[in-house]
Amino acid sequence: MAGSRLERFGTVFTRVRDLIRSGVIKPKEKPLWYDVYKTFPPKRAPLHVKPVTSRSAKKQEIVPEIFYSEDKIRKGFYEQYGRGLRALDLSKSNFVSTCQRFVDKYRELESHGMLDNSSLFEETGKALLKEGIILRRRGAPPVLAESRDPVLGLKLIDMLAEQQSAGTDTTKTTEDKNS
């Protein structure tokens, strides 16, 4: 009896009656309504009847699909570039994902109306690259440092050697001026 509190496994009256019989509830602690219910029981026993619904009787609800115009842009972004290099940082309330930046830039370029839809996607990627956001195409090899900027390809040793030689040149010129 103590397993379920639902009325479908007996009424409240039968459960309280059985608790009194078993000694869990003392006769002095029985509810006020118990004697009234025992003296004047209802004409029909209260039964829990589960309503029967057949699967065919249920009306099939049609839920319309909701698509925004940005969803097409996002779909194209994720198909072409994947998730992106950075993870979403949900701890910052002002964080803007790479995909959202792409959508915003796409909308901006689209509002100018100078490009058609096929080239607009490519131009958006180029515009983001100019802003410093690197997008890597899916399945494409990573962009090499030499292809981005030749200055990035210099080795640290070479840079130090150049600085030292430049430093000795300036000391020589200052010594020549002083003498």
Image: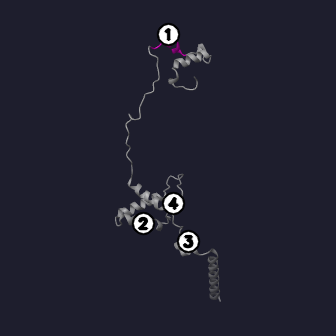
Which residue type carries mark 1?
Thr
Q: Which residue is mark 3?
A: 145
> Of the numbered discs in the image, which one, if any, rests on residue 84?
4
Mark sitting earlier along the chain (2/4): 4
Picture layout, residue 147 above or below residue 14: below
The 10 Å Cα crowd at callout 2, few under 14, some 14 to 19, many 20 or more, is: few
Q: Using the image, tell me which numbered label, if any, was put on residue 39.
A: 1
Which mark is first along the chain, 1 or 2? Answer: 1
Which three-letter amino acid code belongs to the residue tagged 3?
Answer: Ala
Residue range of the region highlighted in magenta in the rendering: 31-42
Amino acid at pointer 2: Glu
Q: Which residue shows up at 53% across the image and 17% down it?
A: 14
User: As rendered, which of 15 and 108 lies closer to the eye?
Assistant: 15
From mark 3 to mark 2, how far is it between C-alphas?
A: 21 Å
Marks 2 and 1 close (CB-CB < 8 Å): no
In the drawing, does residue 71 fall left or right of residue 177?
left
Tell me which amino acid carries mark 4: Gly
**Residue 28 % position (x, y):** 59, 13
Q: Are marks 3 and 4 in contact (CB under 8 Å)?
A: no
Q: Specify the quadrant that holds the C terminus.
A: bottom right
Q: Is residue 44 left or right of residue 164?
A: left
Assign a secondary structure to mark 4: loop
